[in-house]
Image (tube, rainbow, N blue to C red):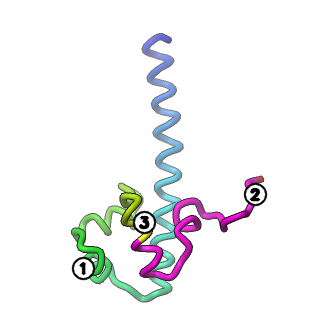
């Protein structure tokens, strides 16, 4: 595969990853707002930096998997929903 084709594939993956990060950020932000929990509170409870939580809420980065489960438990939301936006057992259309 030539470099141009590789670059195009990379850009396509990056765009898809960006959409996924933004969608996850929207779900996380919504869950935090519904629970009326601040970024600072989440950072303290998860023992992470406040900037980490801010980046997650903006879709710049995503939390590590072990943190996903802690966030989901803390917010009393399903971790699968938080990651994918789907409920467990739901078929993708």
Residue depicted at 53% across the width and 77% down the height: 77
The residue to which callout 3 is attached is 68
Is 81 a magenta residue? yes
Horizontally, residue 34 falls left or right of residue 56, namely right
Residue 7: x and y in percent read 44, 23
Instruction: Classify 59 as above or below 75.
Output: above
Is 74 a magenta residue? yes
The residue to which callout 1 is attached is 44
- Is disc 2 surrounded by few (<14), some (14 to 19) or many (20+) residues within 10 Å? few
Residue 92: x and y in percent read 73, 54
Nearer the N terminus, badge 1 or badge 2?
A: 1
Give the distance between the C-alpha atoms of the residues marked 2 and 3, in whole angstroms: 22 Å
Nearer the N terminus, badge 3 or badge 1?
A: 1
Residue 85 position by quadrant: bottom right
Count of marks, rendered view: 3
Q: Give, as a single range, the part of the protein colored magenta.
A: 70-92
The residue to which callout 2 is attached is 91
- Is disc 1 surrounded by few (<14), some (14 to 19) or many (20+) residues within 10 Å? few
- Is disc 3 surrounded by few (<14), some (14 to 19) or many (20+) residues within 10 Å? some
Front-most of 68 and 4? Answer: 68
Residue 44: x and y in percent read 24, 79
Horizontally, residue 52 falls left or right of residue 88, namely left
């Amino acid at each position: 595969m030539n470099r141009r084709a590789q670059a195009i594939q990379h850009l396509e993956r990056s765009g898809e990853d960006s959409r996924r990060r933004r969608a996850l950020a929207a779900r996380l932000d919504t869950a935090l707002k519904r629970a009326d929990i601040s970024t600072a509170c989440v950072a303290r409870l998860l023992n992470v930096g406040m900037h980490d939580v801010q980046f997650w809420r903006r879709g710049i980065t995503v939390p590590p998997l072990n943190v996903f489960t802690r966030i989901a438990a803390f917010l009393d939301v399903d971790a699968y929903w938080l990651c994918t936006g789907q409920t467990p057992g739901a078929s993708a259309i």
